[in-house]
Amino acid sequence: MKLGMSSYSLVGALNSGDMTILDVVDWTADHGGKHVELVPMGYTLTDNPDLIEALLAKAAERDIELSNYAIGADFLPGSEKEFEKEIDRVKKEVDTAARLGIKRMRHDVSFKPPEEASYRQFEEDLPRLVEACRRIADYAQGYGITTSIENHGFYIQASERIQRIIHEVDRPNFKTTLDTGNFLCVDEEPVAAVRNNLPYASMVHIKDFYQRPRSWYHPGPGWLTTTAGNYLRGAITGHGDIDLREIIKAIKDSGYDGYISIEFEGLETCQEAAKISMDNVKKLWETV
């Protein structure tokens, strides 16, 4: 297991200017991390070759691996022309991952809101999603890159939908970035969902949430509403309500020995929250 940090965990500091992506590499090394997962929020890379070179130099200097490159994408635009434009854009992002020497890349496929995320709609959209993922995976294969989709948002989120796309795409270099917390957005029990999709994981995010039932009241800013009307708030890893001990045990028992990223998205100050999160995952991994 190689534990590290998603740059998304520190996006508050990146957006405020308190940190740069080079600082994230230093911060991760200083706190015992082994890799950084790049999520270009608060910085850009595709249009910034100088930053790519600086990032490669900083990672080498601090002995930090660049593990995964995670970008957004939507392959369900309104026209064929827009669809092809999005394919071309994501291919350019694959080129960026290759320049960074990264061998794993996550791209999204669509973000429909809950009211448009029915299984019937998913079946109608599936051929287009599969075509896009195949074309990106085939392009990435030329670089030796494994592409993936994440259980992310409200549409491509449930473990069975992730598996359906993976099996339909049917490429050895197409897998899933497995997020331990996100399944709750569609009210799927995290331990069961993680176990369901572990065999397909190219990358793992450890995330925690606080949960409140729909019978309660909306707790206010910082909380999101799940498809069933329950409430979630991002938590410091190990502080929330997810059974992370059982999840980490499942990951460990599965034989997964790849990259694990801390992904924090709560209300606390991101640097302190990320540090506590990493420390807690280390402790859990050592004790389960």
Image (cartoon, grey):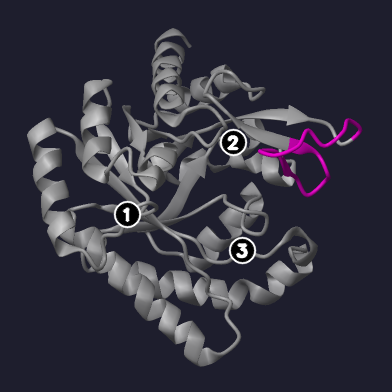
Q: Secondary structure at mark 2?
A: loop
220 relative to 15, above or below = above
Residue pushed farthest right?
215
Q: Which sits earlier in the primary sequence, circle 2 or circle 1? A: 1
Q: Amino acid at mark 3?
A: Phe
Q: Quadrant of the N terminus?
A: top left
Q: Amino acid at mark 1?
A: Tyr
Judged by depth in the image, the label closer to the viewer, 1 or 3, is 1
Disc number placed over residue 43 in the picture, else none: 1
Disc number placed over residue 111 in the picture, else none: 3
Q: Which sits earlier in the primary sequence, circle 3 or circle 2? A: 3
Q: Secondary structure at mark 3?
A: loop
237 relative to 75, above or below = above
* Residue identified by numbered label 2: 181
Residue 228 at x, y percent in the picture: 83, 46
User: Magenta residues, as a range?
Assistant: 215-231
